[in-house]
Image: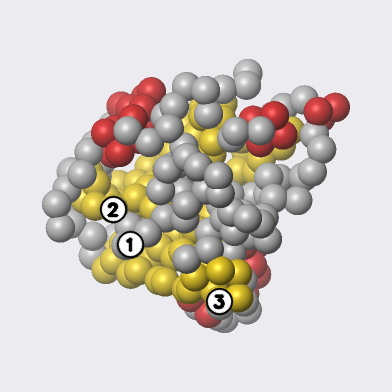
Amino acid sequence: MQTLSLEHELKENSYPGRGIVIGKSPNGKYAVTAYFIMGRSENSRNRIFVTDGEGIRTEAFDPSKLTDPSLIIYAPVRVLNDDTIVTNGDQTDTVYELMNDGKTFEQALRTRAFEPDAPNYTPRISGIMHVKDGAYSYEMSILKSSNGNPACCNRYTFSYDNPVNGEAHFIHTYMRDGNPLPSFEGEPKFVSVPDDIDEFTSSVWSSLNEDNKVSLFVRYIDIETGTYETRIVNKNQ
């Protein structure tokens, strides 16, 4: 599979929606992830990321302008023991709770479907990073309608064992802007990530469409120790 430029993918798409990147730094030291959100409506744009324990949550930047919180207020990132869960909705909690009860990532997501936001039926995209005792693997998932038909939910899980240094995968909700918004197609895109968290954060944030970008979360986890560094960027400050 050809390695794509993440910066190019973002710059050439004015509205990829929400996106998850997971991979491994070129020096082999870090498990890397990024999650961004975008918005077209005032309600979607009225958000920020804030820390919540070892994870993050979304909240309204101006609470007086919040109209419908159902699909925009959630915890995108939660940590369960040695696992870091990253998703674009409240399925973060589903994965956390069911894995805590002994289910797998895939089993947990079989209880969920795409978002009920007709006519878009926004896909639910999710990822999980397993970092323990110097070993690292990750999984990604997308739950989507069948070519826009909500009668059928298509479920795809992608597993990456012992990731190669410098390699990552990128999945996002929409192929491009539109009405209705066309769902992501195919398997996660093969991209590269750098060693430096600040370089990566700056690159992703500057590549997102200026009008539509809202917030960005980036985390680098030391594979040997499990310690991590986090960056959060909010358009609303």
Kindly identify the residue that appears in the image at 63 percent across and 55 percent down.
119
Say left or right for 133 vs 84. left
Residue under circle 2? 189
Q: Position of residue 189 (x, y in %)?
A: 28, 53
Q: Nearer the viewer, residue 199 or 135?
A: 199
Q: What is the residue that sits farthest to the left in this orientation? A: 2
Q: Nearer the viewer, residue 200 or 195?
A: 200
Q: Secondary structure at mark 2?
A: strand
Q: Amino acid at mark 2?
A: Lys
Kindly identify the residue that appears in the image at 56 percent across and 26 percent down.
234
Labelled disc at residue 186: 1
For marks 2 and 1, give the CA distance.
Answer: 8 Å
Residue under circle 3? 152
Disc nearer the start of the sequence (3/1):
3
**Disc 2 to disc 1: CB gap under 8 Å:** yes
Labelled disc at residue 113: none
